[in-house]
């Protein structure tokens, strides 16, 4: 286990503990929407955060068949083996060509570096959050830079990936990276989620994200050594969300519906209940949505 992993995991536990004490003592905590516009010197911190940008390595996922979705089991409705809703069955054998996927979620430092290099503005929500975490919770820039990027719309996530010569993963690619070929319930296997495997269940009313750094929680990685496919930040994928798509999707490299209202979001987040961390559980969000719960990672076809 690396020193970076020990530091990042310890910092996450310290941050969540301090915030819990902060709220327990009744110290006022503002929602992000209530925070005053940050002062101009937040731009110095944003530039400093971007200086710690560290691209994620990519993990190769072999071509082949895997089991996507869940077998309908109405007799066991309260176990993780059953479907979350009607959108994830029938379970089918799906072929996915060889591809690579980011080992880590795109980090805040890397995303800010992209915005600065392409002369794009940082959203008010993200600027406000950064200033709040620095000025109220005293998180140093170096510790904040490896947080996952958040408050990112689907278009912004897609643009980032394309700028890197990559793209958002398809829903099938994301699920194979999380489940392997044997339809694992969670990326790490069949064991129920615990605080040592994933970041989840940290909901509180003020929406201050309680996330861990992208390279932490090694014990929760998938069989392909991809981190945080459950919890921490839910992730945009390329597909439109089709509630009745599974029965009709092609068996090879399904691209998702041609249109829709919501884009698929996978993996659950820091505030999710355990059932949302299942690798087959599907979610969706309006593509223009900015959320403290949603980030992304990129993928790339392989020859």
Image (cartoon, rainbow, N blue to C red):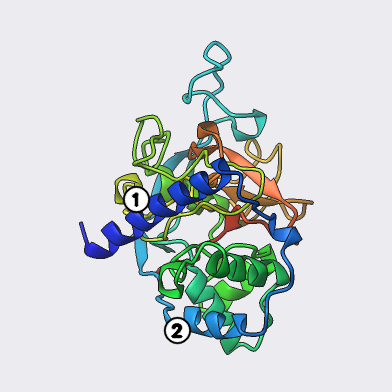
Name the side, left or right, on which 44 lies relative to 302. right
Rendered position, 191 above or below 127: above
Q: Position of residue 63 (x, y in %)?
A: 38, 55
Whichever of callouts 1 and 2 sits on the residue coming sooner in the sequence is: 2
Which residue shows up at 64% across the image and 65% down it?
Answer: 152
Which residue shows up at 58% across the image and 69% down it?
Answer: 130
How far separated are the C-alphas under marks 1 and 2?
A: 24 Å
Q: Is residue 199 visible?
A: yes
Q: Mark 2 packing: few (<14 Cα in 10 Å), some, or many (20+)?
A: some
Rendered position, 153 above or below 243: below
Mark 2 secondary-structure assignment: helix
Mark 1 secondary-structure assignment: loop
Residue topped by disc 1:
217
Q: Could you say which is closer to the camera, residue 98 or residue 102?
A: 102
Q: In which quarter of the image is residue 149?
A: bottom right
Q: In which quarter of the image is residue 118?
A: bottom right
Which residue shows up at 55% across the image and 37% down it?
Answer: 276
Which residue shows up at 67% across the image and 56% down it?
Answer: 291
Residue topped by disc 2:
51
In the picture, which quadrant includes the N terminus?
A: bottom left
Q: Mark 1 packing: few (<14 Cα in 10 Å), some, or many (20+)?
A: many
Name the side, left or right, on which 302 lies relative to 243. left
Q: Can residue 252 be seen in this view?
A: no
């Amino acid at each position: 286990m690396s020193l970076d992993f020990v530091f990042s995991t310890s910092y996450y536990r310290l941050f969540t503990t301090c915030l819990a004490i902060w709220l327990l003592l009744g110290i006022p905590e503002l929602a992000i929407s209530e925070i005053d516009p940050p002062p101009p010197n937040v731009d110095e911190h944003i530039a400093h955060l971007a200086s710690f940008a560290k691209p994620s390595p990519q993990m190769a996922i072999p071509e082949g068949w895997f089991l996507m979705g869940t077998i309908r089991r109405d007799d066991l409705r309260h176990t993780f083996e059953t479907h979350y809703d009607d959108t994830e069955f029938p379970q089918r054998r799906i072929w996915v060509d060889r591809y690579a996927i980011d080992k880590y979620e795109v980090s805040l430092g890397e995303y800010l570096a992209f915005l600065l290099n392409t002369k794009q503005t940082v959203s008010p929500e993200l600027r406000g959050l950064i200033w709040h975490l620095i000025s109220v919770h005293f998180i140093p820039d170096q510790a904040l830079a490896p947080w996952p990027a958040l408050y990112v719309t689907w278009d912004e996530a897609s643009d980032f990936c394309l700028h890197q010569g990559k793209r958002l993963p398809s829903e099938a690619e994301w699920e194979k990276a999380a489940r392997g070929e044997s339809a694992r319930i969670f990326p790490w296997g069949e064991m129920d989620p615990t605080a040592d495997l994933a970041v989840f269940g940290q909901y509180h009313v003020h929406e201050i994200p309680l996330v861990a750094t992208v390279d932490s929680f090694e014990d929760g990685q998938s069989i392909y050594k991809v981190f945080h496919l459950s919890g921490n930040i839910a992730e945009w994928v390329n597909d439109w969300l089709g509630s009745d798509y599974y029965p009709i999707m092609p068996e090879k490299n399904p691209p998702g519906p041609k249109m829709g209202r919501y884009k698929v979001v996978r993996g659950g987040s820091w505030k999710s209940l355990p059932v949302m961390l299942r690798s087959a559980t599907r979610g969706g969000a309006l593509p223009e949505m900015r959320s403290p719960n949603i980030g992304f990672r990129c993928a790339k076809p392989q020859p």
